[in-house]
Amino acid sequence: MRNEVEMLQTIQDFARNNLNIRAVMMNGSRANPEVTRDIFQDYDIVCFVDSVQSFIDDQSWISYFGDILIMQTPDIMSNPHAVHFKRFAFLMLFKDGNRIDLTFFQTDQLDHYVHDSQTVILLDKDGLFGNVPAPSNRDYLPPPPSEIQFYNCCNEFWWVSTYVAKGLWRRQLPYAMRIHEGPVRDMLMRMITWYIGVQTNFQVETGKEGKYFEQYLETSKWDAFVRTFSDGDYERSWKALFEMGVLFRDLALSVSGCFGYDYPIHEDEHVTSYLQKIHNLPTGATDIN
């Protein structure tokens, strides 16, 4: 497997030797000085070019980077009838394990390009970008919630939890699990992010899909979070749902106390009682009460 030095050298050499390419920048985790390097990190690369379409029409250049294991072109997938692009991404996983997410961006569209704080300029033939600040994760730090954002998160969590309950009672496992792992978990993860923000003065990044949660949560809360994941067993799915409610309440009370927001305790109590009632409801019941 080629190491980072070799990969960056390959990328820079490719750009230097192609007159169409005017500048190259790297974004993402490899541009974040606070992230520990590992073998699965992508190379998020943007090439600023005079013509994007030429790289689409003739893709022989891909072999310069190695043998492809699998590739995806999301711009074609989302817009299959387009005949001309001024921005285009090639997501490429190579057989040696390296992955490059390579986006071509046309230079006459620079006014529409916004680079984030995790940016390293690898090459700039024409001085297009001037002095770019040193890379940091400042654009990825979570903001504190407003009072309405906090309430909406709580309300959505408890509201959609009732969907999981009816799905489990009906023994509609795909539906119940999709809601559990979709909107309900989304709200839990949002609350965890705010909780970690409170503990760290909103100065740490929790990562995409909460990948750094374990690093910042107390062991007891991390263990509780793990218990919110279930398998295909109905009773264990019910248990995971109740565990999720306990953890959400714990975190939300901490966050609300920090900001002086009201936690909707009555919604919590009403829904928790309802979930317990549905859990105990006999199969085939014709009345919830």
Image (tube, rainbow, N blue to C red):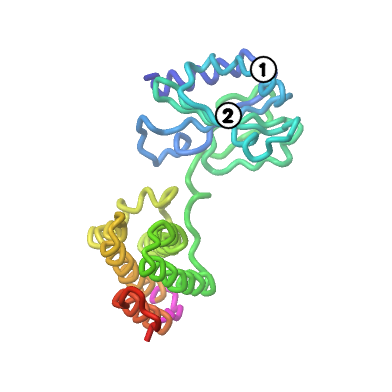
Q: Is residue 78 magenta?
A: no
**Residue 114 occupies which quadrant of the picture?**
top right
**Residue 179 occupies which quadrant of the picture?**
bottom left
The Cα–Cα distance between marks 2 and 1, rounded to whole angstroms, is 13 Å
Mark 2, secondary structure of its residue? strand
Mark 1, secondary structure of its residue? loop
| Percent of width and height locating residue 227 | 27, 60
Q: Is residue 161 visible?
A: yes
Residues 135 and 52: in front is: 52
Quick check: 159 left or right of 237? right
Q: Earlier in the sequence, mark 2 or mark 1?
A: 1
Quarter of the image containing the C terminus?
Answer: bottom left
93 w.r.t. 206: above or below:
above
Residues 185 and 160: in front is: 160
Numbered circle sitting on residue 148: none
**Mark 2 near mark 1, Cβ–Cβ under 8 Å?**
no
Q: Is residue 25 visible?
A: no
Residue range corresponding to the magenta coloring = 257-265
Residues 13 and 170: in front is: 170
Give the residue pinned by disc 2: 90
Toward the bottom, the furthest residue is 289
Give the residue pinned by disc 1: 58
**Counting other residues with Cα less than 10 Å from the Cα at mark 2, is it few (<14), some (14-19), or many (20 or more)?**
some
Quick check: 241 left or right of 45? left
Quarter of the image containing the N terminus?
Answer: top left
Residue drawn at x 54%, y 14% is: 64
> At label 1, which amino acid type do we have?
Asp
